[in-house]
Image: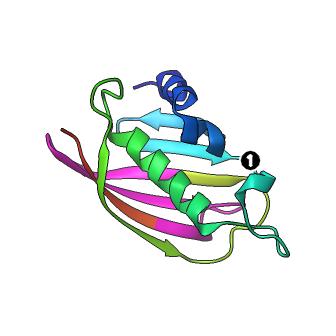
Amino acid sequence: MTKDELQAICNKIPYFRFLDFTIETADPDGVTTTMPFADRHIGNPEAENYHGGIVASLLEATASLSVSDDWETQPPKPINLTVDYMRPARSGTLNAKATISRKGRRMASVATVAWQDNEDKPVAKGLFHFLLV
């Protein structure tokens, strides 16, 4: 799917609208997104860090968008996920990249990474498995 088609899907899904992220790139190998910081994303109000659930949600959304060819009738179903938090995600733009590790007819495995200023210093990494049928 194209970047614009994926963004149109995001605009239809209430939780994706709540996260308010944008598709930056989309190709057969994966998807890259960016999400601006908002008060509703705060997990630690004193340090103004992102809530870990918001970081994981962005990773899952980015991963799911990378593997589905038919969101209207069969969106991908997450069956397993692992998120490793590397450092605090501070206020500011959060970026995420999903790379398809393996995609079959029934299942897909997707590696993800989230970062802020420097992709070489991730704030979180994830591994997601989806049922595609």
Residue 56 position, x and y percent, is: 52, 61
Which residue type carries mark 1? Pro
Left or right: where 50 falls relative to 101: right
Q: Residue at x 28, y 25 (%)?
A: 73
Q: Reply yes or no: does residue 122 show up in magenta.
A: yes
Q: Residue at x 42, y 39 (%)?
A: 65
Left or right: where 40 falls relative to 114: right
Image quadrant of residue 76? top left
**Mark 1 lies on residue:** 36
Position of 20 relative to 60 (above/below):
above
Q: Residue at x 48, y 27 (%)?
A: 9
Q: Reply yes or no: does residue 1 show up in magenta.
A: no
Depth order, front residue of 78/59: 78
Where is the C terminus found, in terms of image quarters? top left
What secondary structure predominates along the stretch shown in magenta? strand
Depth order, front residue of 75/85: 75
Where is the N terminus found, in terms of image quarters? top left
Position of 64 relative to 46 (above/below):
above
Residue 43 position, x and y percent, is: 71, 68
The reply to whether residue 118 is visible in this rendering is yes
| The residue stretch that appears in magenta | 97-125
Q: Residue at x 42, y 49 (%)?
A: 63
Label 1 CA crowd tier, 10 Å (few <14, some 14–19, many 20+): some
Figure disc tally:
1
Q: Which secondary structure lies at badge 1?
A: loop
Image quadrant of residue 111? bottom left
The reply to whether residue 21 is visible in this rendering is no
Residue 30 position, x and y percent, is: 41, 43
Depth order, front residue of 112/14: 14
Image quadrant of residue 80? bottom left
